[in-house]
């Protein structure tokens, strides 16, 4: 057993434990509890001591008893160096240290004398820590968005770190921002517009894309190769280079401030990717099925409707979901084309809220929740389809 | 027979693709080309409104004479900057009504009033008054006369359709002292945003590729930032980073990591002292890049994870037999396997970050050293109102884009050859 290995083992393990405790402490702070010190020196040293004890005990004791004892020791130590904290805080510390010691329970002298043990240890902990940290960093803004929308201006100013929900305020009081957003800021209307625009884009895109994709996938015609490569190139052109000409043309045609104008632009910008995704799928459908259809006397329309469409429902749903997501989240064109509040989409309305007079932030966040929630629900529910859509359409984003 | 079938097939194909081609052509390709046209013109936002001749019709009864009526047309040129030539006027009247002493510009024939009003300079206003009488001595209905709307037509120069061109826009773009700064900001943002997203994508994919409790949940969560609307996320981050009441600053102050609040989105530079050397870091730009990484690493993650899952397990088992350590396994097995995906991902993300507009626009609006080329298109075209300049900047973007695409397709072709 090398001294170096013991040293790295203790150092890495204790650091990992300390990082987990830090994340927990930050979470506790965000519940409005006063906590101003991470106690790095004390906790880190004690962590090293406990890791050494764990190594020395090895498998001489029942593993479950060992980890419980070590975790208890650590929580009691933490309880004594931090004062005046609620009991659930210490319970959290106990659970975290239990989880930690459970991860290192198998490490004993034998493990440390194996090859690359310190690297393995490091990467194990890095993975565990990475998962915790990534979840925290990703979910925190969403959590904050939601909780801020339940607060009042006074509560937000009182303690900007308090992200707890006080159910004693009663449900109508908690959801007040949502009532205000829907009643005073007209979000019901914007939501309707957004829904119409997104669904409309999906339907029109599919109507245009399915026949075109079928032609590109199956039929022979002059210029086919050129067409299928240019689809990808066109798709790579960003909205920002289209904005000025489209703005000038649309203002002269009077198409600005209209849902029709928005629908045309959204359809045209999502069409290339829809064709690209669909033709790939159509190509994978066996040709024999269509030939059977031709023998049965079907024409092209019949083949598309009776054979191709039913078989490619999964691909069509992922295209539809992807296009819906793009249209719902779209911001640049709605910023450019809509400047009358009665035609706003949700994204544009939230931007208008922020730019306009000093809108209290809980209303802004309530609006943000209103625009985010539907798309997240759709994503979680139809994840399989949407992920394949994302992968295929990720050329752009 | 077969040639006939081929002909039918061809015709059907063209019929099926025609609607899509037309739409994409008119909304995507045509604007890209008209960008070139506009960028050589001196057009401002206020020139975009087409000048229109307008008339407001007022009908007045004459007190002593119930079968006579006075009609006043308030005429004006809607444009403050352009003249309208050859204005023609048309209005309809009910039967049995005819004008008394008509202006010589006008004619009245079979219930139709037609006038040639000539040329209207900019801001032009005039009143046209005509008295009508009823031929069969009945009372004239004011309502009926008002129900007809006058029709006007005139020719005006549409500034977008003239053949006057200028090179001034491009001269201004290139001579602008901030242009170099603009380019370097754009490349800095694009490069670090792309690299960061890929590095974090690799890390996340490595993590999720292992078995642990809640793995599928983790995979969904990692994609949240990419799926959620940018508006909501940008404003949440703005609140999070706010110097006075933001969570991050308060948290850092609470744990005594920093002494005073840092304005992460509003401060252009921050001086860092590392090992006795002073580094000037572009703070707001870095924050925007971090947001960018946070929002787009899921995409890299998704791609790399799909590739990782396809790496044969035998390779790792063989490495274990050879006694390779985790770093060696990553460098010698994983990395070569995902290298192709990473290079394609890098190109795609590079192109897209180069054109990213919304994220910076919503977070800083292009202030405190975060002005990139796409932000400049917006600012020139809509904040300053110089459409021609905005177009010229768009052309600069398109030129860069074409270069990137050329490289990208070269790379794609090379990869296809290798397979």
Image (tube, grey):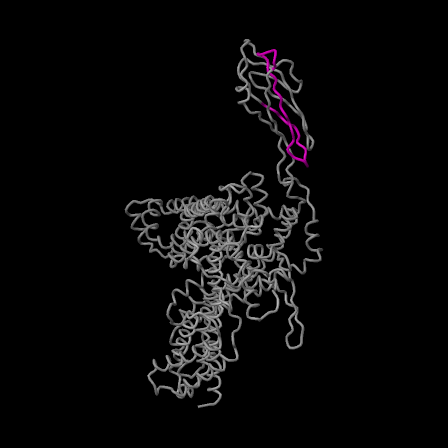
**Magenta segment includes B121:** no
Relative to A30, say whether A49 is above or below.
Answer: below
Q: Residue B144: x percent and y percent?
A: 52, 19
User: Residue at image x 68%, y 60%?
Assistant: B180
Q: Quadrant of residue B87?
A: top right
In screen coordinates, is B393 left or right of A71?
right
For the magenta stretch, what is the residue range? B62-90
User: Residue at image x 65%, y 22%?
Assistant: B128
Nearest the viewer among A191 and B402 is A191
Q: Residue B240: x percent and y percent?
A: 54, 61
Q: Residue A286: x percent and y percent?
A: 33, 56
In screen coordinates, is A354 left or right of B168?
left
User: Exactly how many numbered labels are in the figure?
Assistant: 0
**Magenta segment includes B80:** yes
- The answer to whether residue B18 is visible is no
- The answer to whether residue A317 is visible is yes
Q: Quadrant of the N terminus of chain A?
A: bottom left
């Amino acid at each position: 057993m090398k001294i170096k290995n013991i040293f790295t083992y203790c150092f890495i393990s204790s650091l990992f434990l300390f990082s987990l405790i830090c994340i927990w402490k930050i979470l506790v702070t965000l519940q409005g509890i006063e906590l101003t010190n991470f106690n790095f020196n004390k906790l880190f040293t004690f962590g090293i001591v406990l890791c050494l004890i764990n190594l020395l005990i090895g498998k001489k004791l029942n593993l479950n008893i060992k980890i419980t004892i070590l975790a208890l020791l650590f929580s009691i130590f933490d309880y004594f160096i931090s004062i005046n904290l609620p009991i659930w805080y210490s319970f959290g510390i106990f659970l975290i240290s239990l989880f930690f010691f459970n991860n290192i329970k198998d490490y004993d002298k034998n493990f440390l004398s194996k090859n690359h043990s310190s690297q393995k240890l490091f990467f194990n902990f890095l993975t565990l820590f990475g998962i915790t940290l990534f979840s925290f960093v990703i979910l925190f803004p969403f959590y904050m968005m939601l909780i801020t929308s339940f607060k009042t201006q006074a509560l937000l100013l009182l303690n900007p770190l308090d992200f707890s929900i006080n159910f004693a305020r009663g449900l109508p009081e908690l959801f007040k921002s949502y009532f205000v957003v829907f009643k005073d800021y007209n979000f019901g209307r914007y939501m309707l517009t957004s829904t119409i625009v997104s669904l409309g884009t999906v339907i029109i895109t599919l109507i245009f894309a399915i026949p075109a994709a079928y032609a590109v996938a199956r039929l022979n015609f002059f210029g086919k190769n050129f067409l299928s490569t240019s689809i990808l190139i066109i798709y790579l052109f960003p909205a920002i280079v289209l904005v000025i000409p489209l703005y000038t043309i649309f203002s002269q045609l009077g198409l600005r401030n209209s849902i029709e104008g928005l629908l045309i632009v959204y359809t045209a910008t999502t069409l290339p990717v829809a064709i690209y995704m669909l033709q790939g799928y159509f190509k994978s459908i066996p040709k024999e099925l269509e030939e059977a259809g031709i023998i049965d006397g079907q024409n092209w329309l019949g083949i598309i409707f009776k054979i191709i469409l039913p078989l490619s429902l999964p691909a069509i749903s992922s295209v539809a979901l992807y296009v819906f997501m793009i249209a719902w989240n779209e911001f640049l064109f709605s910023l450019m084309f809509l400047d009358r509040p009665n035609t706003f989409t949700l994204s544009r309305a939230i931007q208008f809220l922020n730019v306009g007079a000093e809108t209290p932030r809980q209303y802004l966040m309530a609006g943000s929740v209103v625009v985010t929630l539907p798309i997240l629900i759709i994503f979680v529910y139809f994840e399989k389809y949407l992920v394949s859509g994302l992968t295929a359409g990720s050329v752009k984003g | 027979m077969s040639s006939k079938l081929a002909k039918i097939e061809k015709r059907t194909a063209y019929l099926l693709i025609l609607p899509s081609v037309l739409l994409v052509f008119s909304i995507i390709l045509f604007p890209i080309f008209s960008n070139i046209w506009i960028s050589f013109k001196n057009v401002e936002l206020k020139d975009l409104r087409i000048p229109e001749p307008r008339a407001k019709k007022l009908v007045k009864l004459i007190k002593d004479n119930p079968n006579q009526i006075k009609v006043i047309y308030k005429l004006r040129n809607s444009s403050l900057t352009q003249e309208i030539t050859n204005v023609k006027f048309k209005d309809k009247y009910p039967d049995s009504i005819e004008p008394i002493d008509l202006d010589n510009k006008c004619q009245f024939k079979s219930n139709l009033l037609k006038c040639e009003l000539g040329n209207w300079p900019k801001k032009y206003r005039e009143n046209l008054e005509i008295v009508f009488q009823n031929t069969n001595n009945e009372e004239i209905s004011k309502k009926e006369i008002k129900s007809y709307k006058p029709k006007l037509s005139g020719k005006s120069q549409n500034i977008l359709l003239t053949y006057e061109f200028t090179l001034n826009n491009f001269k201004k773009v290139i001579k602008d002292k901030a242009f170099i700064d603009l380019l370097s900001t754009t490349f800095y943002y694009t490069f670090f945003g792309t690299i960061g997203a890929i590095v974090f994508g690799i890390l996340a994919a490595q993590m999720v590729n292992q078995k642990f409790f809640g793995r599928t949940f983790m995979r969904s969560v990692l994609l949240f930032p990419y799926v959620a609307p940018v508006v909501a996320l940008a404003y949440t981050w703005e609140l999070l980073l706010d110097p006075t009441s933001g969570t991050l600053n308060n948290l850092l102050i609470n744990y005594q990591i920093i002494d005073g609040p840092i304005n992460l989105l509003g401060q252009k530079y921050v001086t860092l002292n590392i090992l006795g050397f002073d580094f000037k870091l572009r703070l707001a730009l870095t924050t925007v890049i971090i947001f960018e990484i946070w929002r787009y690493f899921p995409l890299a993650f998704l791609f790399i994870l799909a590739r990782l899952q396809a790496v044969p397990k035998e390779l790792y088992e063989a490495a274990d037999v050879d006694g390779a350590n985790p770093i060696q396994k990553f460098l010698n097995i994983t990395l070569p396997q995902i290298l192709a995906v990473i290079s394609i991902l890098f190109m795609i993300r590079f192109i897209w970050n180069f054109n990213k507009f919304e994220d910076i626009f919503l977070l800083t609006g292009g202030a405190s050293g975060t002005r990139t080329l796409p932000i400049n298109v917006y600012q020139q075209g809509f904040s300053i109102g110089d459409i021609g300049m905005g177009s010229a900047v768009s052309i600069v973007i398109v030129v860069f884009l074409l270069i990137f695409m050329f490289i990208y397709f070269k790379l794609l072709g090379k990869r296809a050859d290798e397979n």
